[in-house]
Image (cartoon, rainbow, N blue to C red):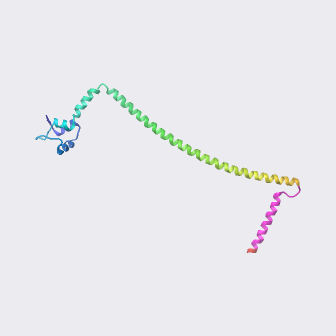
């Protein structure tokens, strides 16, 4: 039995261009009236798709609802998996951001501790100076240590002013 190129293309599910290429390459032959023998199509392309579909549909008529349900179930599972992946990425980003915040706060705490240590050292130095001044004032009627220091500072400033005059 001979069929046209168009009918052969439809039944086997290939394009007419593919059939013409096979003819030009010598893989497929045509009759004098430019038709193709069905046996040639079977030899080159195998069973026609329409026949395959019919055989499959007979085999799967009973299982179609089950397959449809399982396809829908698989699609739903894939969507849920994609959603969970997005949630996971979002949570990972949040964890990363929180770690950066914690690191920043730890640096700030370290800087504040250093500042506090310096302030405590200054307070201790000040308290020791005051304590020494208080003890000296109790032991003798001499001026406190701080007043003596002021006198020394005044004499140093006066000496510096005199030296400046000498230079200018």
* Residue 39 position within the rendered picture, expressed as x and y whole percent measured from the top left: 16, 35
Quadrant assignment, res 36: top left
Instruction: Answer yes or no: is residue 7 visible.
Output: no
Relative to 31, 116 lies left or right: right
Task: Quadrant for the N terminus, please.
Answer: top left
Q: Residue furthest left?
A: 32
* Residue 147 position within the rendered picture, expressed as x and y whole percent measured from the top left: 82, 59
Q: Is residue 145 above or below residue 84?
A: below
Q: Residue at x 20, y 44 (%)?
A: 21
Q: Residue at x 27, y 26 (%)?
A: 59
Instruction: Say if the magenta span includes residue 52.
Output: no
Instruction: Say if the magenta span includes residue 151.
Output: yes
Relative to 143, 102 lies left or right: left
Relative to 146, 75 lies left or right: left
* Residue 19 position within the rendered picture, expressed as x and y whole percent measured from the top left: 19, 42
Which stretch appears magenta?
140-165
| Magenta stretch, overall SS | helix
């Amino acid at each position: 039995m001979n069929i046209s190129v168009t009918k052969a293309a439809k039944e086997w599910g290939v394009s007419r261009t593919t059939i013409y290429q096979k003819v030009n390459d010598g893989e497929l032959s045509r009759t004098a009236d430019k038709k193709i023998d069905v046996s040639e199509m079977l030899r080159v392309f195998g069973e026609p798709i329409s026949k395959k579909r019919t055989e499959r549909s007979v085999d799967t008529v009973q299982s179609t609802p089950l397959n449809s349900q399982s396809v829908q179930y698989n699609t739903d599972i894939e969507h849920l998996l994609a959603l969970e992946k997005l949630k996971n990425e979002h949570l990972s980003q949040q964890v990363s951001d929180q770690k950066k915040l914690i690191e920043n706060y730890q640096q700030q705490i370290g800087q504040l501790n250093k500042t506090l240590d310096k302030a405590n050292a200054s307070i201790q130095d000040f308290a020791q100076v005051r304590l020494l001044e208080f003890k000296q004032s109790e032991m003798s009627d001499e001026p406190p240590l701080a007043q003596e220091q002021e006198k020394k500072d005044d004499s140093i400033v006066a000496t510096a002013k005199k030296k400046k005059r000498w230079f200018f």
